[in-house]
Image (spheres, helix red, strand yellow):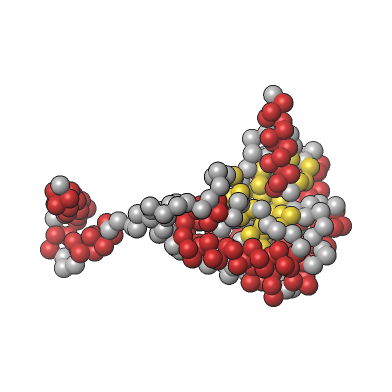
Amino acid sequence: MADGVARWGRRTVLRRAALLGGGAALGVAGTTETAWIADRRLPLGGGPASATLGSRYQQVGGGVEVVWGVRTGAPLVALTFDDGPQPQWTPMVLDTLAEHGVPATFFLVGELARRHAALVRDRLGGHEVGNHSWAHHDLARMDARTAYDDLRRSHEAITAATGTAPRLLRPPWGHLGGAVLHAAARLNYRLVLWTLQMVEGEYPHDPAGHARRIVADVRPGTILLGHDVGPERRLVALRGLPDMISGLRAHGYTFVTVSELLRRAAVLGAAR
């Protein structure tokens, strides 16, 4: 049976190569070998794509929730910042938020949280922290053990730096793999992606224009992604942050942390 499946798979690969290349691809050395490499199965348990450890006992709780935003009629928006903390920009963001009385959720890189603990210590009152991996490597390429060890190390560093244990996870680049889900479940995290991202590259040297674009695109229940670390072009969003805050408030929006957004959405949903 397995040999029959293998022959079928090989015939399918060769047929597709012929269709795509008019038959010429069959004569290219290494074509079928490359196709076989691409077609190889990933590990059944414990690998980057698998959300199980195979036949081993699953050291997880009841499961893990993944959210991009919430559906609500209430004018709520959650402002989030990734990749920090860093001395260049994080204090500027915290100063702006403090000036305008806006709470936010910071997805911190564990290595940076340990290195720059003084930047966030005693400055995150009213804000929320989440885990953004230890060193901003791609968790979706890691096996289950490595992904868990990475997130656990970051968890401990963030807890030590901020005095608060993170309960949210945002994987770098939003890349999800089965091993990431498994590690998140073991750590009792909610997985938080985003609804809307800053588009700094479209508004070079125009903070006000970028702010207007974001204000126009936000909808109730939006989780908005920004960065307090990165290339200089991202400063367009941070310099326009006061206009963004004022613009959203003028449209009736209230800023909340991600956890508060999820809590309020659940309460509103239960009341219907």
List x then y, in percent, for residue 47.
40, 59
Q: Is residue 133 above or below residue 211?
A: below
Task: Indicate left or right for 227 with 56 as reference.
Answer: right
Q: Is residue 207 visible?
A: no
| Residue at (72% x, 31% y) in the render | 268
| Residue at (41% x, 54% y) in the render | 56
Residue 30 in which image quadrant: bottom left
Q: Is residue 21 above or below residue 134?
A: above
| Residue at (14% x, 52% y) in the render | 3
| Residue at (73% x, 37% y) in the render | 264
Task: Give the camera-side residue of 160 and 103.
Answer: 160
Task: Give the camera-side residue of 72 and 118.
Answer: 118
List x then y, in percent, for residue 86.
71, 71
Tally the numbered discs: 0
Task: Indicate left or right for 173 with 8 as reference.
Answer: right
List x then y, in percent, for residue 136.
57, 67
Most extreme residue toward the top is: 272
Q: Is residue 40 visible?
A: yes
List x then y, in percent, for residue 69.
63, 43
Most extreme residue toward the bottom is: 115
Task: Indicate left or right for 231 with 147 as reference.
Answer: right
Q: Is residue 164 above or below residue 115?
A: above
Residue 26 in which image quadrant: bottom left
Task: Give the camera-side residue of 108 and 201.
Answer: 108
Say which quadrant the C terminus sits in: top right
